[in-house]
Structures are given as C-alpha cells and as structure tokens.
Amino acid sequence: MRREEGKEYLYITLHTELPYQYSAGRYMSRFLTTLRDEAKILASRCTQCGTVLVPPRVVCGNCFAEMKDFVEVGPRGTLKTFSVINFPFIDPFTGVQRPVPYGYAIVQLDGCDNWLPHFLDEIDVQKLRIGLRVEAVFKPREEREGAMTDILHFRVIGDRSRESSPEGEVS
Amino acid sequence: MSQRVAIVGIAQTTFQSAKRAQNYAELVHEVVSELFTKTGATHDDVDNIVSASSDFWDGRTISNMAIQDVVGAYMKSESKVSSDGTLAVLYGMMRILSGQYKTTLVVAHSKGSEGTPNLIANAAFDPIYQRQLGIDGLSASALQARRYMEKYGVSEEEVALVSVKNLANARKNPYAQVAGEFTVDDVMQSGYLAEPIKKLEASPISDGACALLLAREDLVDRFTDKPVWLKGVGHCQDCYYLGDRDLAESEALAVAAQRAYAMAGIRDPGKEIDVAEVYDAFSYQELMWTEILGLCPRGEGVELIRSGVSTIDGTLPVNPSGGVLAAHAVIVAGLVRVAEAALQLRGEAGQHQISGVKTALAHGSFGYCGQMHCVWILSNEK
Amino acid sequence: MPKSVAIIGSGQTNHTSRRADVNIPELIKEAVDRALADADLTIDDIDAVVIGNMEHFEGINLSDMWASEGSGAVMKPAMKIATGGTTGASVAACAYYHCASGLFDRVLAIGWEKLSESDTTTGIITAFDPIVERLTLAGAVGGLAIEANLYMTSYGITQEQVAKAAVMARKNAQRNPHAHLKLDLTVEQVLHSPMIAYPIHYLDMCPTSDGACAVIFASEDVARKSAHPPAWVKAAVCRHNHPYIGDVDWRKNTLESAAIEAYRLAGITNPRRELDVIELYDPASFALLSWIESLHICGPGEGGKMIDAGAITMEGDIPVNPSGGVISTNPIGATALIRVAEAALQIQGKADARQVEGVRTALATGFGGSYWSEVFILGRTP
C-alpha cells in the first residue's frame, strides 16, 4: 500500500533517566551540615563590603571579594514576596509531578542582606501579604539529612507591626 | 585583522577524575583568581566575559548561571558558547575587534564526574535514527578509527605510539590527569574499550577549568610583557550523520586550517609551526588531525612520531603537554590547547617547554568524530 | 566606535503549540529558507552561522550538530550560543560581533525551540541552583510570579491593568501570521482564567511554542549594497545578574542598566519620544507594564497608567509588541531573536498588517537567566 506524505506523523518516545551528583562544594557543604546537625542557617559575610548572603558562597558578586566569614542568620525573617503555585509540572528531582498547590516564599532572613526562596505553609493568598514575619520550621533531628528539605517550610508568625512584641506571640 | 588582540594571561586548574570538594563556582573562582593574580588585573579591568560550558555535562539548563559572580558578570555582558573552548576564544576576540570591548575574560569549566558520561554522549545522537542504538562518543570514534586505519594502512601498534608519546609527555605536565611511561605493548594490553580503541588510547573524563585574558593591542602592556598574539583562526562544521561523511577524512578540518593559515600568513605549516597542541580525544585522532592539518602527508602521521619529528625533542612537537589523552574536561580541553600553546610561546611551559617557539598551533574539536574543528595560529611576535 | 552592521533579512516559522509534521532540523530549515528568500540570498552567500536553543528543553545534547542538517552550517564556520531565555538575543549579538569584528560579511543567526517535545517547566527549574533553589521553584511562572507580586504591590498596579496588557498583546498577535496565540479576549476572561501562580493568571502567561527564527546580519559594505533597506544595529548591550533568585535586587535591574548603555550608544536622550516601537520580551503580561518603566518609557509605577491611556497600543504614541510579543508566541531559543527580527521588520517597513507607521528607531529586548537582559536598538541609518 502506498503511504501518502502528511497522513501520519510519528513520535519516538524516550524515557531516559539522566542522573547527576551535584557537588555542594566547600561553602554549601558547611551550610548543609550545619542545617542538619544544629538546625541553624549559615550565611557568608563579605570581608570587603560586609554584605551577608545566604546560601554562603565563595565570592561576593558585588565587589568580587572572597567570602571568608560565616554567620548565623534567621531562622526568622520577613516575607519579601510570595506566590501560590497551582499549576502541575514535573519535578526534575523526582521525575513525577510536584504536589500542588504550594506556597512559594521569598524570605529575607534576619541578619541577611539577600533573600531565600522556600516553601510557605500558607496557600490562602487572602492571608498573605508582603512584609509578614515568618519563621523556618525544621524537620526533627533524626530526619535531617543535609539538604534544603531539612527546612520543611516557613510559617507565618505575625505582622511586621507586631515584630517587637514578646516571644509568646508565636503560636 | 586590522587591530590586534593578544592573550595576556593564562590559568588552568589541575585536571582530576573528580573534584568533589568544589562546586562549579568554586572551581571557576580558583582559575579566575589565579589569572588575576598573574596579570595584576582586577574585575574593573575586564569589560566583558565569554564562557564555554555544557548544559548536559553540568546537569543544568543555562550552565553559565552558576559562575556569574565568580567571573564578575554582575551588570556586565557575559555570553556562553555552548561548544568547544577554542570558539570561546574566537568570540572573545571578535568582541574586542568590534571596537565595543577592550578586554575579554574567556573561561571554560566542566566536571565530568557529576553526570553520566555515556548517557550524556548518547544524548548527542538524534533521537529518531541513532540514539536507540546506544551509540556514544567512544563507539562512534571506534568506527572512525577503524575506517582511518583501513584506508591508510595504519596498524594498531602504530596508533598506540601516540599514547606512548603523549602519556610520557604528560609526566612533565603538572596539570595532567593521566601520565606514565608506557610501551606499545602496555597500550596493546590495556584492553579494548571499543575495538580498535584500547583503554590507554581513550582520553579520561576530567574535572577542571581554564581561563584566558584577552586584551586589545594598546592595553597589552598593562597586563604582561609577554603577550601571545592571535594571528589566525578558522573554524568549520561538517555534516551530522556519521554515514554522510567519509570518517577517514575531514574536509571541515582542512577548511578550518586553510582559513587559519591564510589569516596568519602560513604557507608551509610543517615548516613554519614550532609546536602543535591538537585535540587527541583518542590516540588515532592525533594521527588524522596532524595529517589533515598539513603537518605531514596523508597516512604519514605515524611517521611524524617514529622519525622523532613530533616527539618532545623533535622539530615539530605535537602535544608536549600530553594532549587531551592526558586530561579531558569536555569543552575545557580545547581552551587548554590554546593555553598550552600560549605557555609555550611565553616560555612558561615548565618541564615540557620547547625551546625557541615562535609560532604555535592550537586545535579544538566538537561533535562526534570531529564534526566541528577550530584551528588557531598563535605567535609571540606581532 | 563599533563598525556598522545591519540586518538585511529575516524569516520565521508559523509558530504553534506542536509541529508534528517536521523534526528539529526541518523546523529550522523552514525559518532559514524564509530568511534567505527575504534577503534574496542563497545559503552559499552565508559566511558563518550562529545558532542557539536550550538543550534540556528537547533533551538533545550538542543540538547544533544535528541542527546542521537544517541550519545550512555544513562546511561553514558555525557556533552555538545558549544563555536561557536570552538565547535568541545572545545569538543575535554573537552574529553582530561576527560582522562588527570585520571577520565575516554575512552571518546567519538562528534561534529555535520545539517545546512540545519535553516538559519546559522542568527544564527551566534546572536552570537554577540544584541545592537551594530547585526545590521550590516552579519554572518561569514561579520566578515571574514573585516579581509580579512585588511590582504590583509596590506600585498599586491592579490585576485589571495587567489583564489589559494581556488583551492588547493577543489582539496585536491577530495581525501577525507567525504568532501562536491570536486570541480575541476580554479583561474579564483573563481575570477569570485559572490563577496558575498568584498573581499570574493562565491568560497572563506566555505559551510554549514550536518555532524557529533566522536573521541575516551583514557588514556595512554588504548592507549598503543590499537589495532591501537594511535595519542598522545602533546598539547591542547585555547585562547579567547574580546567580541566585534571592540575590536579585529588582530595584537595580539589568534591563534598566542595559537600556541606559544602549541609549548612550545610540545617542538617545528621550526614549519615549525617540523610540517609535518596542519589541519587549514579555514572558508574562505584568512585564509589559513594569519593564517599560525599566526602559524609561515612563516613570516608576506608571506602567499601569500607560496601559490605561492606551499609550502602548498599536494606536498609541509608543506601540509595544505589535507582533503580539512573548505572551503570544514563545519558542524559547527563538523568542528573543524574534524580538530583534520584528524590530528589524518595523524599520524595514516590512511588518505588513502589524506595521507601525514611520518607524525610524526600534528597540528589542531579551530576558532570561537569573534576570538577565539584552537590549538592541535598530535604526534606518548606520
């Protein structure tokens, strides 16, 4: 039988898995082990301009000085912007769909000059606004493995206006 | 070229099978810092950056994103060549020749240790016809080796001489990953990876980085008293499917070489070139490439070695550094050929220094079985 | 001063969600053939090829090698440039520097993507740091949503104003035969479409497209002899940012920095008055308001007023995206090159139904990476 051009277009489907082992390197390894062992968030401070950046890294991109000092930052911070992700997509880490919806927080940790993205436990945008105070919620010690997932998410702890109120305000 | 551009600084890392202690930013920071220390340059002296790296090898879409801060790209122009490092040098030079820029930082990085090499290589074969055959760089090159050896009557023992020469040279190169005093018999007994290519005839897969600083003629003195001038360059791409080419030949390399020679005013490359760093990802490739580069007649690449011409104490040493057989960080390896040629021209090649080098050739290749070639002619004389 | 370079022809596929009838090289060839026809040239007239796409979007490593079957790069100098969303603009810049360097006379710039062949959001997530940022990033949508939220909150820009921009762009696209989404929308429809990532609605966001674009750059002498009026490159500027999302300071953005430098190079002091049309890389509709502020078309926070006043519509004093822009058409590696091609068509008076009258100066942008920007200014005279 003669095949006519344009009647049938085929696809070749590949299901290739392509694994990688990403080196965390010197700075990020210290960041991750501290997260795992002490539930503390480390940043690096530029010896030249004093900028504090999380995650810690070898160079301060503003002045090209090598970062040498590590400082603890957070675990509280301020919500600088956010979104709630509703659409489905394949997570490149797992190869399956990332569960949606989830809150996406961009947090300025206390003591830090830049911002850190992480999950937010609130997905109702009516309850969210830029400027809210948030706090990192860590996994229990025995479940922490030296990865960003050692922080479960950030949770809202109140308004910036109530920032100065006593500790008991977090509930 | 109406204006002149020179290499004014050179830095490379050691090449190793796995640099687990460094992420990409830290790896590149090492090489850029060294470059700045050597040249006295600061980031204010660099007005643009051209990098070369691979999204597939890095496991990262936009592989140059990781290195933005360490190359000082903040609020500057940086671009990424997703091809061999030799082309990054070309793009860096073109930016200066345009008149818009004065100094280009050229940097390449790769860590073969983080991905899965044969899957990454296999992914370069089109998914419709070839990929499902499981072909990768090694198996494709084996086809080319067999075809070249058959067509020009070259034996396995003769091809093995390349590994003997280059891996011995590599002992004098502190940056090399693989080195040693091997005999032809050692190479022959090293075991077939893909017949006729044996273990000691296949380049390793390396982690490492390399950086060059290019400067416009009038700024050269600020960084060095030993500039290496970019005198000629040619690059050319062949057709894709292995079956569409006679794998024993490479018209693309011949065209690239002609263009580079014409630009540099080279008429008799075998006589005028003092040292060559060619892209020997596999031992047979050094023979093929040196022949097609016109350093000797076709089929006589092995004669260059046997007669001592291309050995480290010969009249035209080829790969005194040990070549790609000694260290092969993908994409970086082409930039290293330029770096090694430049070190020879500066008299800074250490134990593998060739005396009296005035003109050097550096060759890079990309795509399987040499689909793309880039040839550079460098000189320490204007 | 850089040497003068002009665009003498361009071609695009008719972009759509899935081109089942062509494979990747065939898709590319369609755009290349159209560009050559537009410039009255054949592939033999082309000196060099610059091509770009993002490898992980189709899962093709060394994609320029397979592409050579359609790009016309066989037996020509060719290189691949890949920088994420900016790729098309980075390709254009590289082709521009090929000519401006004096080394090449006619250079074919090609951008392409066949996004139907894999998951684009997955590919974009892998552009970011694997250890800290991939965990939570939801591709381009997520990255843009946080910027949109910050912008809209800072300046009190309403969702209605942003939706108006989405309606305008899709209306413009109806006049562009190459556009992917030619939708006749109302503001209510945009506002009632699903909130995919607050504050971005489904109809605010760019699609994923299959498509290719080719643009021919020429050196001054060749351009002057071109059969068609060329579009001269007055400025090509690129600015990069820090690598982490959390490092980006949206008050000091790369687009503004690039635009300031481009205006300086092109001698523009009042962009609102001196620019006749803008082709903006608008991955989401808020960018049509926010990023014209970065271009100094209006003051900070005045983007909303601009759309309310109709200033950026086809009938306005500074039409933005007569082509329909990125939210109408998005084959990523081609997207920024399409901006350059569309700006050139406006200068050349060849934009047909989407032509803005009397265009003398046009601006095109590219956006990608970690909030990187490229800016081109094109004009009727060198």
Image (cartoon, rainbow, N blue to C red):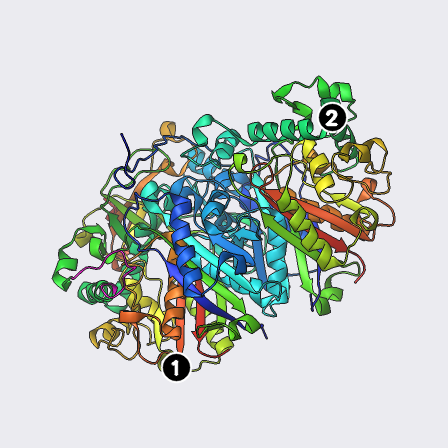
* Disc 1 element: helix
* Cβ atoms at labels 1 and 2 below 8 Å apart: no
State yes or no: residue B285 in magenta. Answer: no
| Left or right of residue C72, residue B229 in this image | right
In the image, taking residue C158 as reference, residue C57 lies left or right, namely: right
Real-space Cα separation, disc 1 to disc 2, in angstroms = 67 Å
Q: Is residue A30 visible?
A: no
Q: Nearer the viewer, mark 1 or mark 2?
A: 2
Residue B126 appears in which quarter of the rendering?
top left
Kindly give the residue lying farthest to the front in the view shown: A2
Segment colored magenta:
C173-184
Q: Is residue B195 above or below residue C186?
A: above
Residue C2 vs B198, above or below: the answer is below
Can residue C355 be seen in this snapshot?
yes
Give B161 or B205, whichever is nearer the viewer.
B161
Q: Nearer the viewer, residue C322 or B235?
A: B235
| Left or right: C56 as drawn, with respect to A164 | right
Disc 1: which residue: C274
**Is A133 in front, or is B186?**
B186
Q: Residues within 10 Å of mark 2 (few under 14, many from 20)?
A: many
Q: Find out whether residue C175 is within the magenta segment.
A: yes
For the point 21% across and 77% down, which residue is it? Answer: C309
The residue to which callout 2 is attached is B160
